[in-house]
Image (cartoon, rainbow, N blue to C red):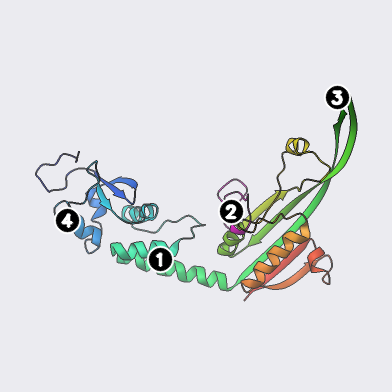
């Protein structure tokens, strides 16, 4: 049922909204912070008739983006996560609600990001360590033998001053941790992976607490070597306007290198 009010059709007390299926509670003062906005006009008048079954005002817009709309109304400034990648969506929502100061800040932020993307540095390096594994293999009902194989564990570090590029790279790789997890940032990506050798049983591979690295669907290819990983970085970097600045250790053998540096002007 709808929250009680002092008189029919008037807003009293906290306001609870259902925006695209996500629920928010706030105050009338927050919603009317910018009187010339659509929200300001909506909440200065009588209660709209469009409510959900629990009496919450229903707005058929993106519920996730409304979090940032509401925070702007509360704080009076834009406060987005560093890796926020939906500026176009948020701008469309701000335009719908007609919050002019928010539109102005979003335009400034988009221009700043564009400036940073135009001039960027990208660095990728890969290392590999060999782990010698010994395990038993069953040869018969009462027969076991000792087997040995090598597991190659790769570690890659990618740094880019263009956080948008790094977000795209994360999206192309499967099983990559979210940037907000420990050890990750908007500008730094750390990866560790180990392909399973054909002669290593899956149960023994699982004991090593390592994982393969694949391209995200629908590609799904496994990245089995350092060269394959650097090739993917190279192709993507060239597609986004970077050029190779340095190759280590051998400038003439780019895909068998351990470190690549790119620049974009």
Query: Which sits earlier in the primary sequence, circle 1 or circle 2?
Result: 1
Quarter where residue 253 is shown: bottom right
- Residue 101 place in picture, x, y as percent: 32, 65
Label 1 – label 2 distance at C-alpha: 22 Å
Instruction: Please tell me whether residue 175 belongs to the stretch shown in magenta.
Output: yes
Name the front one of labels 3 and 4: 3
Placement of 263 over or under 85, stated as above or below? below
Residue located beneath label 3 in the image: 141
User: Quick one: 150 or 76, which is closer to the camera?
Assistant: 150
Q: Determine whether label 3 and label 4 are within 8 Å by CB.
A: no
Quarter where residue 39 is shown: bottom left
**Which numbered dot is residue 84?**
none
Label 1 – label 3 distance at C-alpha: 69 Å
Q: Is residue 51 left or right of residue 118?
A: left
Query: Which sits earlier in the primary sequence, circle 3 or circle 4?
Result: 4
Judging from the image, what secondary structure is the residue with disc 4 in?
A: helix
User: Quick one: 251 or 136, which is closer to the camera?
Assistant: 136
Q: Which residues are magenta?
A: 171-186
> How many numbered marks are there?
4
- Residue 215 place in picture, x, y as percent: 66, 56
Residue located beneath label 4 in the image: 44
Q: Determine whether label 3 and label 2 are within 8 Å by CB.
A: no
Crowding at mark 1 (Cα within 10 Å: few <14, some 14-19, many 20+):
some
- Residue 96 place in picture, x, y as percent: 30, 64
Judging from the image, what secondary structure is the residue with disc 1 in?
A: helix
Query: Which sits earlier in the primary sequence, circle 3 or circle 2?
Result: 3
Residue located beneath label 2 in the image: 185
Instruction: Please tell me whether residue 126 belongs to the stretch shown in magenta.
Output: no
Residue located beneath label 1 in the image: 106
Judging from the image, what secondary structure is the residue with disc 3 in?
A: loop
Query: Which sits earlier in the primary sequence, circle 1 or circle 4?
Result: 4
């Amino acid at each position: 049922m709808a929250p009680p009010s002092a008189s029919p059709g008037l807003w009293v007390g906290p306001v609870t909204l259902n925006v695209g299926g996500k629920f928010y509670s706030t105050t009338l003062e927050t919603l009317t912070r910018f009187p010339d906005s659509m929200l300001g006009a909506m909440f200065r008048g009588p209660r709209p008739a469009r409510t959900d079954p629990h009496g919450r005002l229903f707005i058929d817009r993106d519920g996730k983006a409304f979090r940032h709309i509401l925070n702007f109304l509360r704080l009076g400034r834009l406060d987005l996560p560093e890796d926020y990648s939906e500026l176009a969506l948020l701008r469309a929502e701000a335009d719908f609600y007609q919050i002019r100061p928010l539109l102005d800040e979003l335009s400034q932020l988009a221009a700043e990001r564009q400036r940073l993307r135009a001039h960027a540095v990208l660095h990728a390096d890969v290392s590999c360590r060999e782990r010698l594994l010994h395990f038993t293999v069953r040869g018969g009902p009462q027969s076991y033998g000792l087997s040995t194989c090598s597991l190659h564990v790769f570690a890659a570090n990618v740094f880019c001053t263009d956080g948008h590029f790094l977000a795209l790279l994360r999206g192309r790789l499967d099983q990559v941790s979210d940037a907000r997890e420990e050890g990750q940032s908007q500008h730094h990506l750390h990866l560790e992976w180990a392909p399973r050798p054909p002669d290593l049983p899956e149960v023994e591979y699982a004991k090593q607490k390592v994982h393969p690295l694949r391209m995200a669907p629908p590609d799904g290819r496994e990245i089995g070597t350092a060269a394959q990983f650097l090739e993917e970085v190279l192709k993507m970097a060239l597609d986004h306007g970077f050029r190779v600045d340095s190759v280590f250790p051998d400038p003439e053998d780019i895909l068998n290198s351990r470190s690549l540096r790119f620049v974009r002007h």
